[in-house]
Image: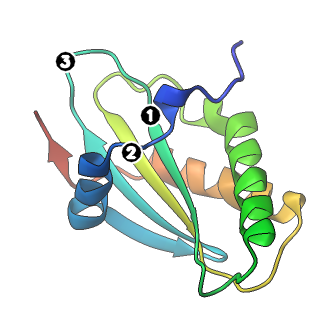
């Protein structure tokens, strides 16, 4: 099993990020706001994820980076929950909205719940290129 978080698994395209926030469906699971958009491509791609921590909530860059590292690690360890989705790949935005720094265990359990919700809940929006 390859458990790395490759560059192609991270959402960095400005066009896709804009589309994710414009057309994606969202839900809230404290301390995260989650935005999900399903994209249908002909070429096989992976699910892409975006990690974000608000500068308003956590003023210090070291604190924001700590939370992002914990989020990335929790996602990397549990990304197999989503499995191999054949019909459409998902772009996921994980936005941290708490003003407190929570432990890795809390972040990991919440991200597990989020991944199960994303896997079980059909996404209402579909986009074809």
Which x, y percent locates residue 16?
A: 28, 47
**Residue pictured at 63% horizontal, 35% vertical:** 79
x 30%, y 50%: residue: 14
Residue matched to label 2: 91
Task: Work out which residue is located at the far left of the displayed protein and give it.
Answer: 129
Residue 8 lies left or right of residue 106; in this view the side is left
Quick check: 69 above or below 86?
below
Q: Quadrant of residue 85?
A: top left
Colour basis? rainbow
Kindly check if marks 1 and 2 are in contact, taking CB atoms under 8 A apart as contact.
yes
Residue at 37% x, 41% y is 90
Residue 47 is marked as 1
Secondary structure found at label 1: loop
Indicate which disc, 2 or 3, sits on the residue closer to the N terminus.
Answer: 3
Q: Which mark is residue 42?
A: 3
Q: Tag 3: Cα neighbours inside 10 Å, few (<14), some, or many (≥20)?
A: few
């Amino acid at each position: 099993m390859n458990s790395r978080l490759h560059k192609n698994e991270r959402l960095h395209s400005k066009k896709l990020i804009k589309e994710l926030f414009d057309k994606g469906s969202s839900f809230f699971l404290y301390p995260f706001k989650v935005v999900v958009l399903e994209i249908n491509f002909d070429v096989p791609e992976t699910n892409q994820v975006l990690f974000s921590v608000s500068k308003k909530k956590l003023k210090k860059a070291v604190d924001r980076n700590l939370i992002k590292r914990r989020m990335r690690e929790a996602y990397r360890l549990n990304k197999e929950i989503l499995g191999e989705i054949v019909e459409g790949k998902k772009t996921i935005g994980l936005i941290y909205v708490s003003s407190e720094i929570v432990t890795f265990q809390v972040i990991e359990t919440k991200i597990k719940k989020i991944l199960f919700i994303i896997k079980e809940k059909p996404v209402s929006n579909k986009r074809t290129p």
